[in-house]
Image (cartoon, rainbow, N blue to C red):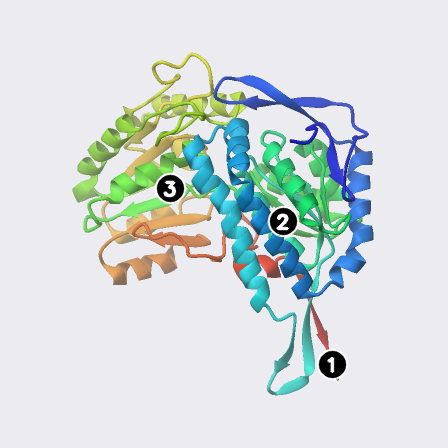
Amino acid sequence: MMDSTKFYINGKWVTPAGTQHLEVINPSDEKGFPQITLGSQADTDNAVSAAKMAFPAWSASTKEQRIELLERLFETYKARADEMAQTISQEMGAPIDLAKTAQVGAGAAHLKNTIRALKSFDFEHPLGDHAPDNIIVHEPVGVCALITPWNWPMNQVMLKVAPALAAGCTVVLKPSEISPLSAMLLAEMIDSTGFPEGVFNLVNGDGAGVGSQLSEHPDVDLVSFTGSTRAGKAITIAAADTMKRVGLELGGKGANIIFADADEKAVTRGVRHCFANSGQSCNAPTRMLVEKSVYQQAVETATAIANKTDVGLASTEGRHIGPVVSEQQFLKVQGLIKQGIEGGATLVAGGEGRPEGFEKGYFVKPTVFADVTPEMTIWSEEIFGPVLAITPFETEEEAVELANDTLYGLTNYIQTSDKTRAHRLAKQVRSGMVEVNGKSGSAGFPFGGMKQSGNGSREGGVWGLEEFLEVKSVTDW
């Protein structure tokens, strides 16, 4: 790989002006491996300037030219998939099999779906049959700052980079300082693909530094951010003075509503989904709401599944969960598990401390709490670890009320064999996405949330393209 202390600006790997360095930590053994540089204001300014200078020519490129480059990038990405998987596994602790499939695969799928959406997207069209001489033109927003999280590196990076470039925008990417190496590898791929200088730029840094600098920068036209609700609020405030567009995909506390007539695998599926990626997914179904008549059986099943869930090193092949990403995250999860115990929830699996056999690494026991009530911290706060909270309900109305009893609104889940009820509840739960009976969204479905899970923006497919486009109306065409 390239020198990890450098930045990619204006088509070149450059030595940063910033002098502060940060070690990237392998969460499986707590050892640092490469260092990155944290960008300074000068680095941010250089990257934004390069993107601004490149915008006129790139925004005037044809759809066919952009498709050709993105298709070449897709082939390069596939060719270096194993390298990307190893990088993600080391930097954020995803088990290598998960890294090779879901983590790397998400990036490939989003790039492929962006290309598909771009091919069919009409950038100019009449207002309608009643006004054929009124033309609606979709134009790129401009310079876009893309700020991405550590938990699904290529999923979130590609959900932003691919549609921004497809729309004709130029970008400055700031990946998470916790998992930056996969984004740097993508920058290397983009460089080898032949994108024009300045179209894609990468500056490493933390949220308080480069993140804030990009959010405030007068030459940045749009900020697209995925991460915590706390950080999303700070970015919105920072961007207000320049009135730039802000797209936010934030936290979640999804409810998984399981009725007595749900299929026999519903509870098992829900527990495994909650624990996937060590619980570090904003759309994880972390609150399991179970109809009272089958509640005890569900608790027993969830306990058994948690006790059978293996924990292992990220480098080890197999179906297990790895560590959480950092010491800070480990301590936060441990603290919330302690609060669950002290708050009166019934601990039925897992608990505080590392799993047996681990003295090093940020490993967390797969944990299940039963009898969780809305006044408890673990009911309302996003834990971002392998921790499941189970709560009984008696009626459909109560289930909806409990599901909506949250500041968040990203993804809710419904398990029932009654299709009419599933459709009815899907309209009543307040979330940007609803998954029914274990069926996940198809290629290009819009990803995003309501309430404090986002500001109405959606990523993926045609919605991902529209996120980076302005609408212009022209008369007498």
Q: Residues within 10 Å of mark 3 (few under 14, many from 20)?
A: many
Q: For the residues marked 1 and 2, what is the alpha-carbon distance in whole angstroms? A: 32 Å
Name the quadrant containing residue 422: bottom left
- Secondary structure type for disc 3: loop
Residue marked by disc 2: 161
Residue marked by disc 3: 285
Residue lying at the far front in this picture: please name it: 79
Point 36% across, 44% down: residue = 255
Relative to 243, is 34 on the left or the right?
left
Pointer 1 with pointer 2, Cβ within 8 A: no
- Secondary structure type for disc 1: loop
Amino acid found under the numbered disc labelled 1: Thr
Whether residue 247 is visible to the viewer of this picture, yes or no, is: no
- Residue 475, numbered label: 1
Q: Quadrant of the C terminus?
A: bottom right
x%, y% of residue 362? 46, 21
Amino acid found under the numbered disc labelled 2: Val
x%, y% of residue 108? 52, 48
* Residue toward you, 447 or 215: 447
Q: For the residues marked 3 and 2, what is the alpha-carbon distance in whole angstroms? A: 27 Å
* Residue toward you, 327 or 61: 61
